[in-house]
Image: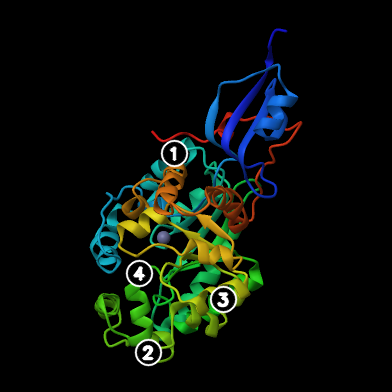
Amino acid sequence: MSADYGLELIEAEILYTGMGLPIRNGAVVVSAQTIAAAGDAAQLRAQYPQARTGRQVSVVSPPPVNAHAHLDMSDYAFQALPYFRWIPEVVIAGRSLRGLAGARRGLETVQASGTAALGDIVWPGTPEVMEWLLTEAEMSGVAYWEVLDPNPASAEATFHQVVLDVERFRTLERPGGMRLGLSPHAAHTVSHKLHKLLADLARREGLPMQIHVAEHPSELELFSSGTGPLAESFLRMVGFTTPGLSLAETLGREPGPDLTPVSYLADLGVLDARPTLIHMVNVTPQDIRLVAQSGCAVVTCPRSNANLECGTFGWAEFAAAGVEVALGSDSVASGETLNIHDEFRAARAIHPDLDPRLLVRAAVKGGHRVLGSKAPFLRRGEVWDERYLWPERP
Ligand SMILES: [Zn+2]
C-alpha cells in the first residue's frame, strides 16, 4: 500500500491542544492544511498508518504569549546588574532612548518570533507609544499605562491626570487591536493613596492591571526594615523630586518585620482588583496563599530575574497553590530579547525539575488568561498553522 502523501503525522515531545493539560509524546495529523487529529502519538500512528512521518519537534501548541514586556525600551542595550543598581544606572540613565522608534523595532521582533499576544507596559513619558499601540500596532493584547508617584501629597493630582489619560486612550481602542490597561509601577514607587485610587479605577472601568512586585530580595528588605540597597537607591532618587519624603509617608505606615510587598498590597485592598503580579520572586508562603486567595495571576520573567540577581521564581509552589502563571520577556535591557520562544527555552533551563508541560501551558493559556484573550484549539477540522511547531533551540 502506498503512503497517502496528503496526510502528515508530526510528532511532538509535548502536545498542547489548548484544552486540558499538555501531553507527552503527542502528535498531530494534518491533511490539506487542516488538522485531522491531535492526540497520543502511538495511537495516531496506529490509526493513520498511511500518513507520512518524519517530522519530530519538541512542542506542538498554539503560539505562546509574551505577557510582560516594555517595547519602548527596545533601543536600550542589555546590561546585567543587581536590580537596585539597574534601575538608576540603566533604566533612568538611558531614558532618552525610550520612545516610538524603539517600540516599533521591538514589536517587529515580537511579531517575527510568532507571539500570539502581548502585554506591554507603556512609560508615561512616551504617550505616543500608547497612541500607536492602540490605533495601529498589529498585535492583540493589553497596553498598560504606567503610573509612578511615591508622594501621597500629589496622589489626587496624579490620579486626576490618569483619569483624563484613560478617557482619551479609551477612545483609541479598536476591535482586534490592543486594549488599554493600567500599571501602577511597583508596590513602593506608587504611594499608598494612589495605589488605592488606581485599584478602584481599574475595578470600576474594567481595566486590566499589572504591577511589578517582590522582584529583588532588597524589595523585601525595604518593606520589612526600610533599609538596604533598594531603600537607599529609592530614597536617593526620590530626593531629587520630593526632598524629605520618607518611606513611611509613601507606604502610609512604618516598614515592619511582618510586612512584605504582597501583604502591603493585600492590606490596601489592591489585590481585590485582581492585578496581574509581575516577578513575585521574593515571597513568603503566606504571600503565595494571599495571591492564591485573591485570584491574581503572576507573570514570571526568568531571564530578567537571573540577569538582575533577583533569584529564581518559586514556580512549583505557585503551581501547587493553584495560581495562574504566565511567561514574559521583560525589556531587552534586562531580558536580552523580546522573543518569547527564547524565554521559554531559558525557563526550561532555569527550572530543570519542573514538568515542561506546565511551562508550555503557562506560556500559552496563562498568557491568554492574563490578557483576556483565547488560544486557538488544535482539534479535528481546525486550520493548521506552521506556527504551531515551536522553533527548536537555535
Ligand atoms: Zn517589567
Location of the C terminus (image quadrant)? top left
Q: CA distance from mark 1 to mark 4?
A: 30 Å
Amino acid bearing label 4: His
Amino acid bearing label 2: Ala
Question: Is label 3 in contact with label 4 (beta carbons under 8 Å)?
Answer: no
Look at mark 2 in the image and give the residue it sits on: 248
Location of the N terminus (image quadrant)? top right
Label whose residue precedes the other's in the sequence (2 or 3): 2
Q: CA distance from mark 2 to mark 3?
A: 26 Å
Q: CA distance from mark 3 to mark 4?
A: 20 Å
Amino acid bearing label 3: Arg
Query: Which mark is in front, 1 or 4?
Result: 4
Look at mark 4 in the image and give the residue it sits on: 216
Mark drawn on residue 264: none
Look at mark 3 in the image and give the residue it sits on: 289
393 and 277: which is toward the camera: 393
Q: Position of residue 383 (x, y in %)?
A: 70, 30
Query: Which mark is in front, 3 or 4?
Result: 3
* Other-residue count near label 1 (Cα within 10 Å), few / some / many at <14 / 14–19 / ≥20: some
Look at mark 1 in the image and give the residue it sits on: 108
Of all residues, the one furthest to the top in this rendering is 2
Q: Secondary structure at mark 2?
A: helix
Q: CA distance from mark 3 to mark 1?
A: 38 Å
Left or right of 384 on screen, residue 393: left
* Other-residue count near label 2 (Cα within 10 Å), few / some / many at <14 / 14–19 / ≥20: some
Amino acid bearing label 1: Glu
Query: Which mark is in front, 4 or 2?
Result: 4
Label whose residue precedes the other's in the sequence (1 or 4): 1
Task: Report which quarter residue 91 is drawn in.
Answer: bottom left
Label whose residue precedes the other's in the sequence (4 or 2): 4
